[in-house]
Image: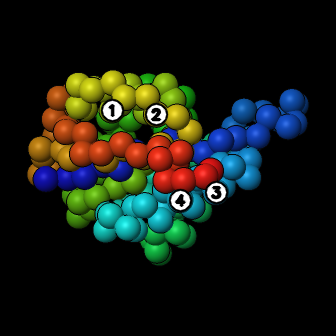
């Protein structure tokens, strides 16, 4: 059994209209929400053994803040194929994970993350910014990840945890 935690990046800033999309940072609200999601992961005792993030600044900042709040001490790895590619590319990344990791946190973007959750679980939940979904995968090896192999254990949104 493997567990995939899926975290959409926090609310990002549009303050600088000339900033390239991958360079947009988190807003204060996004920073708070990322920390809350990390605390929620810690509260649920779901500390991942690996954290992967899209290359976008807002995703990396979300991953870093969540990692600090949950007590994750490993490196947050950047993965170029998690930046606006496709659910298929996300599945390829997941299939390539090392099997010594039983729980992995993936931080990225919509619509890819919503599509990924739907492919894995058959459910179509909305993932607003900083939403966290936990998917239990009925597999022993990451290479066996495939559509329909997952069950959505829970979905939590920052607003459900109090003021953003």
Q: Sequence order check: which comes first, mark 4 or mark 1? A: 4
The residue wearing badge 3 is 32
Secondary-structure class at tag 2:
loop
Secondary-structure class at tag 1:
helix
Please give the label number shown on residue 127. 2
Q: Decide which of 80, 67 is in the foreground and name it.
A: 67
Tag nearer the camera, 3 or 1: 3
C-alpha span from label 4 to label 1? 21 Å
The residue wearing badge 1 is 117
**Relative to residue 28, is residue 21 depicted above or below?**
above
The part of the image, by quadrant, that contains residue 40 is bottom left
Residue 127 on image: x %, y % = 46, 34
Apparent side of residue 143 relative to residue 155 in the rendered image (left or right): left
Q: Are marks 2 and 1 in contact (CB under 8 Å)?
A: yes
Apparent side of residue 61 relative to residue 48 in the rendered image (left or right): right
Within 10 Å of disc 1 (Cα), the crowding (few <14, some 14-19, many 20+) is many
Residue at point 79%, 34% (across, down): 14
Residue at point 23%, 60% (across, down): 102
The residue wearing badge 4 is 36
Q: Decide which of 29, 2 is in the foreground and name it.
A: 29
Q: Sequence order check: which comes first, mark 3 or mark 2? A: 3
Apparent side of residue 116 relative to residue 122 in the rendered image (left or right): right
Q: Sequence order check: which comes first, mark 2 or mark 1? A: 1
């Amino acid at each position: 059994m493997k567990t995939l935690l899926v975290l959409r990046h926090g609310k990002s800033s549009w303050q600088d209209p000339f900033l390239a999309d991958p360079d947009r940072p988190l807003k204060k609200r996004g920073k708070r929400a990322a920390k809350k999601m990390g605390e929620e992961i810690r509260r649920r005792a779901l500390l991942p053994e690996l954290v992967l993030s899209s290359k976008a600044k807002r995703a990396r900042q979300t991953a870093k803040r969540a990692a600090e709040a949950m007590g994750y001490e490993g490196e947050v790895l950047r993965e170029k194929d998690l930046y606006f590619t496709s659910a298929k590319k996300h599945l390829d990344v997941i299939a390539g994970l090392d099997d010594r990791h039983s729980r992995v946190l993936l931080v990225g973007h919509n619509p890819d993350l919503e599509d990924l959750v739907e492919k894995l679980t058959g459910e179509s939940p909305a993932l607003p910014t900083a939403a966290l979904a936990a998917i239990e995968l009925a597999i022993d090896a990451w290479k066996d990840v495939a559509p329909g192999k997952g069950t959505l254990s829970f979905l939590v949104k920052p607003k459900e945890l109090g003021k953003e």
